[in-house]
Amino acid sequence: MAKTWITDRWVKTATATLPDGTTTRLTPTPGQLRNLKTLPAHFRTSRYMIGKRWRLEWINQDGQRRSKQYDTRKEAEQHRNEIEKQLKAATAPDRFMRQSFAQLAEIWLAGKAGTRASTIRRYRLELRNHVLPRWGEVTIDTITRQQIQAWVTTLQARGLAARTIQHIVKKTFGGAIRYAHQEGWLTNNPVALVAVPRPVELEQLPVLSYREIEQVAEAAKQVTGLHRDRALVYVLAVTGIRIGEALALQTQHVDLVRRRIHITATWSLGADNLPVLAPPKTGKPRTVAFPDFITSELAPLLLSDPRGWVFRNKANTNALNYSNWGNRVWRPALTIAGIDPGRGITIHKLRHTAASHAIAAGADIKVLQRMLGHANASETLDTYGHLLPDRLDEVVDRVAERRALELAG
């Protein structure tokens, strides 16, 4: 017998006798269910339109039958899910409920097949440095929200950045706890309502001006004598694609006629700590546009090797290595261009430069999200929302203008 079930108190199936004497079961049509007031009598129960329509029943861990009524099936389903989790936890083997967090973490990681090696590496690093020293020997059924909140305060006191704390608590530690909850080893998720610090909104992001982009691009070419390096600076600072995505570009991914770059892969570190091609960060390919002057920068690179990597090493045998390029070209170029190291202009933060100039040119949040390859618009808004122009006066003035036009007519 099922431990939980939902019953419709108002509507029932009916039985009809066919000409040959056999019977068949009839059920109301979707149209009849949408208009219950006209439901045929043979589909109505004795409780039709009396009280709440839906009843959830369950057998608890003591073998006792319980029930509760609801106005909508959705409410009944939601409570049913909660009841089933509680029943599952009540019958879970004690060894799972009483396991240490360290044991849970290994089970959780073992089940993350298909996750990028670089992501697993970050999980393990955060577990080793921040999570296991506090929670490793603690049995999971004794962990409370209050204990976790106190731990968050400790992480803040160590000077960790807000985004780092968010990842440690909600993604790494919280990921393992959520897994235990889903498996029924915990009756609730103590991480769910824990408050973590929000990143402080920067009034001024580290951004290069157009003139500074020119200076750094020319300096990069000066360092190596190769046009390739100037072009790479332009692509990163203008399109906003990630360095791993740029270095993974092959010539077939660039359309000079339509001025489009198709992002289909990125470089990531594999299990052996060596670079491997992987899907883009969000797992989805995307297309970004570039202005005319980038066309003249990319054209020589595509023509010199129409089937290879766009940004190649000097031997033309492989794609550029991110770390090597950063140390041997990017940093010297910043020095030559006179960019103050204190401004925090890193290769990755060239994305801020691209986004800021795009906003100034009229890009909205959805355009930025697609351009930067963010998983959702909220991530884009959290980072760049303060740069968007305040259009309140423009909007209300336009409303007043349209009102005046309609009333005048």
Image: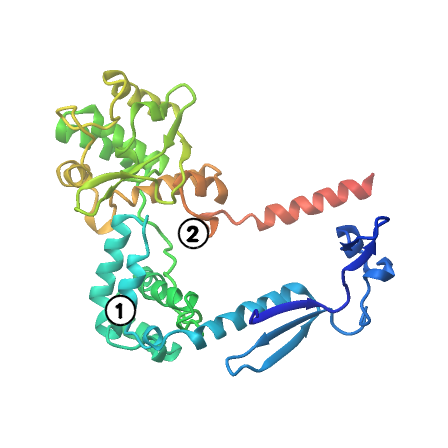
Identify the residue at the far top of this view.
Answer: 303
Q: Which residue is mark 2?
A: 379
The spot of residue 201 in percent (x, y) is 39, 58
Give coordinates of residue 244: x percent, y percent. 27, 39
Asked which secondary structure carries label 1, the reply is helix
Q: Is residue 269 visible?
A: yes
The quadrant of the picture occupied by the C terminus is top right
Q: Position of residue 213 (x, y in %)?
A: 28, 35
SS at circle 2 = helix
Q: Left of 78 or right of it: where is 34?
A: right
For the residue pair 395 and 143, the one nearer the viewer reads as 143
The residue sitting at 41% across, 66% down in the picture is 183
The tag on residue 103 is 1
The amino acid at mark 2 is: Glu
Who's the residue at 66% across and 44% down the image? 398
Q: Residue at x 20, y 27 (%)?
A: 312
Figure quadrant of residue 109:
bottom left
* Marks 2 & 1, CB-CB < 8 Å contact: no
The answer to which quarter of the image holds residue 329 is top left
Three-letter amino acid code at the position of disc 1:
Gln
Q: Which mark is residue 31?
A: none
Give the number of callouts: 2
Which callout, 2 or 1, points at the residue further toward the start of the chain?
1
Judge the density around disc 1: few (<14), some (14-19), many (≥20) Cα neighbours within 10 Å: some
* Mark in front: 2 vs 1: 1
Q: Position of residue 49 (x, y in %)?
A: 81, 69
Give how far apart the Cα atoms at labels 2 and 1 are: 33 Å
